[in-house]
Amino acid sequence: MAWSVTQAPAGRASCICPRGIGGSGGIGAAASSSQALRSSARRRKRVALCCGSPLLGRALSLSCHVHGKHYSRPSTRVSCADPVSPAESTAASTATASKDLLEPSKADHSMEEQTMEIAKQIQAFRDGSLKLKEQDAALPKVVPPPGDGQRIYEIDPYLKNYRDHLEYRYSQYKAKVDAINKHEGGLEAFSRGYEKFGFNRTAAGITYREWAPAAKSASLMGDFNNWNPNADMMKKNEYGVWELFLPNNADGSAAIPHGSRVKIHMETASGVKDAIPAWIKFAVQAPGEIPYNGIYYDPPPEERYEFKHPRPKRPNSLRVYEAHVGMSSTEPKVNSYSAFRDDVLPRIKGLGYNAVQLMAVMEHAYYGSFGYHITNFFAVSSRCGTPDELKSLIDKAHELGLFVLMDVVHSHCSNNVLDGLNMFDGTDSQYFHSGARGYHWMWDSRLFDYSSWEVLRFLLSNLRWWMEEYKFDGFRFDGITSMMYTHHGLQMTFTGQYSEYFGMTTDVDAVVYLMLANDLLHALYPQTITVAEDVSGMPTLCIPVADGGIGFDYRLQMAIADKWIDILEKLKDEEWNMGNIVFTLTNRRWMEKCISYAESHDQALVGDKTLAFWLMDKDMYDHMALDRPSTPRIDRGIALHKMIRLITMALGGEGYLNFMGNEFGHPEWIDFPRSDQKLPNGKFVPGNKNSFDKCRRRFDLGDADYLRYRGLQEFDRAMQQLEAKYEFMVAPHEYVSRKNEGDKIIVFEKGDLVFVFNFHWQKSYTDYRVGCLKPGNYKVVLDTDERLFGGFGRLDHSAVFHTNEGWYDDRPQSFQVYSPCRTAVVYAPVVPESQSVDEPLEAQTSIPIHNL
């Protein structure tokens, strides 16, 4: 991204079918003490350097350039008449809301008609053959009324002991929905705040609105009026909303040219402030300056990207490739949306993933925050390109059939005053809780007040904006543990006791916001996916809102990655406990889906280690070339790297996530460019000379056929393809038949497949009997020891394995295999030509599979 601007005046049991219900005895999805501490430490690493200055751009210029597009310095606006506000209603609402800032949706249908219409719209949307315009037209326009919220007690009877809290929570949610329906015309209309707030252009001119109740005066200034704070004064209504209408110039052109810098000038109780508009759609860092500038982004029609491809159908089993556009280049630089579109998306598709999760999309002033200290919530990160280039990226992903998730950060906000929301109107309580409750001491960031009407409008509209304007398919909600509890999960060990989740430390307002967000998204976008990053194990998190839950589709199974690190850091191979590994992988709540991962971006940050580095350490630097002899550490690392990832995918949840580059064992950590710093306490923190060397992804290593990284990448590709074919992550049949501590063997079934893991460091077993359900012949469909994957090729893939009738490991059938040390092998039934691979297991055998 190269953007130069005109200089201006100052201005995150053996049988597990079904899985058990998480109860008061600690059984459930709660994180361990070490996990909670580790997660807090990782988040602290992300933001510890957020007080540092962002990198400065090139020298000042007298014109604007956005990836080759030129914008000349705008001339002074010529007004043909005094500014006149268009005829739009600004009637009163409740509390701080402006009632008719958004037009209410139609209310002249009966409830039965609305329900039937919604059902038709959802069915039409789920038709994968819909074209883009047909798909958009088929989106539901009404959010259904709340359910009774009672099914949670059927799903988890332990919740009955906390009915008072849960009923209060649900009543607060329903009350909020009722209020929004009454005063704003419903969630659908309420969530379109971007159509009234911020900048909106009509045929007559530009209207700018901003909510800043404590400001004493406000005006809009920028390049368009030579930064004159007195030229375009704004008017304030009784609800704290400031408004300005700028008519077109005499020649019909917009009063504010596309690409112009703009700020709102306010007199506040804490002094004069020039701020970036809160609803700004684009912001850039001016060369030679630290604070960002708001950019009026309204390109001419010929420069606007038009989407060509419909959203893909929601995947049945989710295989997510977690990616950061800026650091996705093999070169030490900030990569662009266009380069990611052309170079990385085809790689993701080729590896067999069906979804990409984009990090750091929302504008953040400090690059080293990994995109978690948001300054401008409606703006794309300008480091990587323009809004239209991001749209092109997402459209290309849809063309490839990739689901696109966005890492959304509504759990906190950057502490920046000059270019963020903090102290926007001169008070610390406009968007956030005042005082200590509004400050996250570990992240050095501000915490939203989710009880505020206008905060709800802002955040819900933010979600809608990214779905409508950029065609995202869903969200990963970052850091919601911090939202759901007033202690934010800090210095807190979650043991699984339900009293930890439902009590005075629960932030009901925040939970209600999450319920509203999920309600909105799933009603208007039936194919959407929402993922929750929660370390606490909150019950009901992934149960629909209508049933009394919070409404997410998936939760991240965060305990798994920490378990692998604990094992690799503290235990010798002979100390690995098979039962404990299986317990961690399968310990999740009944009917709440999880996304598992062996490692994510957290483990890749400087100060931590990736799995590959834990396993192979410094040997990776000298012994990964195929023309050099390997070492015992490299052989062990390559073998276990594949086994860990496969067993995590197979047993860990209904979805799987991988951070880019880790599929081939990326050899280095992530270290964002930073300079030396002196913290307020006087401590000196050395930087890395603003180097991008460790802030990139060496995809060339995984592609090199002369390096051992290639074998790891090819295995990951084969693993993804196996899951795509059999969809074993979401198979209803799941049974662990063996966890042998002496042999270090784990055997389990997922769907039709039989998985055999031998974690022994030196023992291989011939004629090893494994139990299974379905009789017949089996064949090898995946083998971690295959030479293509960097293994030793000790198995004959042409062999056919015949089952024997008779109970073994509580299974009605069994067959014998050769199980080499440190290998995992997946066996599938040999399907007769007359029988489909996709035929359900229950249709292929007379033995019932449920409740085994």
Image: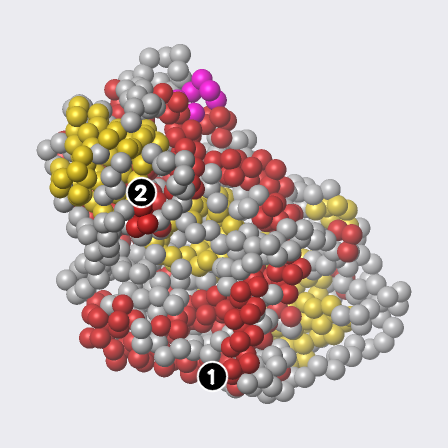
| Residue that carries the numbered disc 2 in the rendered image | 752
On the picture, is 801 further left or further right than 106?
left
Res. 368 visible in picture: no
Res. 300 visible in picture: yes
| Mark 1 Cα shell of 10 Å, populated few (<14), some (14-19), many (≥20) | some
Which residue occupies the extreme front position in the image? Answer: 834
Q: Which segment is the magenta one?
A: 704-710
Q: Nearer the viewer, residue 231 or 744?
A: 744
The residue positioned 13% from the left and 35% from the top of the image is 575
Which residue occupies the extreme left position in the image? Answer: 742
Any mark on residue 178, and which? 1
Q: Quadrant of residue 192?
A: bottom right
Q: Residue 125, percent across and down?
A: 56, 62
The residue positioned 49% from the left and 59% from the top of the image is 528
Q: Residue 683, percent across and down?
A: 35, 46
Residue 298 in the image: above or below residue 183: above
The residue positioned 76% from the left and 63% from the top of the image is 256
- Between disc 1 and disc 2, whose residue precedes? 1
